Image (tube, rainbow, N blue to C red):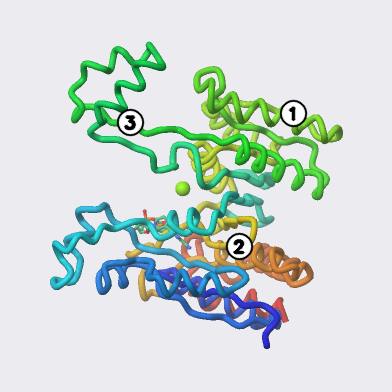
Amino acid sequence: MAKHKIAWLPGDGIGKDVLNAARVSLDALGLDAEYIHGDVGWEFWRKEGNPLPDRTIELLKRTDCCLFGAITSKPRDEAAMELAPELRDKGFVYFSPIVKLRQLFNLHTNMRPCRAFAGNPLNFRDDVDIVVFRENTEGLYSGVEFHPVPKDVMDAFVKHEPKSKRFASVPSDDLAVTVRLYTRKACRSIVTQSFEYAKKHNLKSVTVVEKPNVLRETGGLLVGEARKIAANYPGIELWETNIDAMCMWLVKNPQIYSVLCAGNMFGDIISDLAAQLVGGLGFASSANIGDDYALFEPTHGSAPKYVGMNKVNPMAALMSAKLMLEYLGEDTMAKTLEAAVARVIADGKVRTYDMGGSDKTTDVADEVARFCR
Ligand code: NAI
Ligand code: MG
């Protein structure tokens, strides 16, 4: 029996290309794993009315972790029109498989390393080395939303918060509400993981990105917990920065930051910003980690315009595979893979179009794999 069981979910479009590339490196490294294919994405929405079939969920439950490619997603009404004719008007509603997986497997932590590799022509600066820890299941993305707003919900707002009175006379259909929910537990968890990471890697600061002066209750809870937890890590400074200022600082002085810690939405925003500092979508890897499961994925989507062209950059997927190797305890292989990626970028001989080259996805995959053997 193989040492590791990995759910293999390429999904749509270039998801297949980049996962194939990752596999070439994992095989070159000699990872002792069983890879089990799972169906996910647009094809299964159209054919079955479900982009995340139950059999795939069951598959994930039987594996140690998952490597995920990318999926195609469309707004609800557009999605409904693309259903197979016999499935139309049967009540199927499109949902995002990746958001659902995060919730189903309680993948509460999203970790996104943004390290500038030496020699990458796409670097904004060459000295950026940031890791974003984003809370992944709560906040503004909890899914608690109303439109129209039911009367008893509006009544409760008015009863408990006089400031909501100015909205009470708005017709319910002309008002939409999205609730930002933070639990103390999730706040403590994301902050603790940020500090533990800083400690393990000998980093000097953790920056909590919030807006507690305006979002007093949710922002206040996260920052308050961060202060308490920071007290247990005397060698690491806690920096508190507002989200708006953080966007400015990340452009002005990104090299002074090491660990950024944020709730779901602000974490989403700064992780895209930080990723672009080190080359953008072709380089942005991520880990979605829970207490007993984890899913690794490049953060880019299915890039429909490059489907079947063997053209996109596989580095984000390769670095996601590297995060998976760390999760599986295969630290030596993880280091070898990262060094191979760094080497190929620095050599500059084999490059996809986004880096100014004309090599194929498979060329880059083979070149990285050469340094993994
Ligand atoms: P996208 O990330 O698929 O592509 C945007 C553009 O970025 C591409 O056209 C390409 O120019 C560039 N790009 C992306 N990945 C690249 C790579 N590995 N190498 C080089 N260049 C790369 O985003 P887009 O076009 O907004 O969305 C396409 C589909 O993907 C949509 O259906 C969207 O809903 C879905 N999507 C899925 C995600 C996921 O699976 N987690 C995340 C983002 C979008
Ligand atoms: Mg995003």
Marks 2 and 1, how far apart at CA = 28 Å
Q: Which mark is residue 177?
A: 3
Q: Nearer the viewer, residue 274 or 80?
A: 80
Name which quarter of the figure residue 346 lies in.
bottom right
Quarter of the rendering occupied by the C terminus: bottom right
Q: Earlier in the sequence, mark 2 or mark 1?
A: 1
Disc 1 beta carbon < 8 A from ligand 2? no
Marks 1 and 3, how far apart at CA = 32 Å
Identified at 55% across, 44% down, the residue is 271
Q: Residue furthest right?
A: 235
The image shows residue 164 at horizontal and vertical percentages of 34, 16
Give SS at disc 1: helix
Amino acid found under the numbered disc labelled 2: Tyr
Q: Residue furthest bottom?
A: 1
Q: Which mark is residue 308?
A: none
Amino acid found under the numbered disc labelled 1: Lys
Amino acid found under the numbered disc labelled 3: Val
Establish if 157 lies above or below 266: above
Categorize mark 1 by other alpha carbons within 10 Å: few (<14), some (14-19), many (20+). Answer: few
Categorize mark 2 by other alpha carbons within 10 Å: few (<14), some (14-19), many (20+). Answer: some
Give SS at disc 3: strand
Give SS at disc 2: loop
Categorize mark 3 by other alpha carbons within 10 Å: few (<14), some (14-19), many (20+). Answer: few
Identified at 59% across, 24% down, the residue is 220
Dot 1 corresponds to which residue? 228
Identified at 66% across, 45% down, the residue is 130
Q: Nearer the viewer, residue 51 or 359?
A: 51
Dot 2 corresponds to which residue? 293
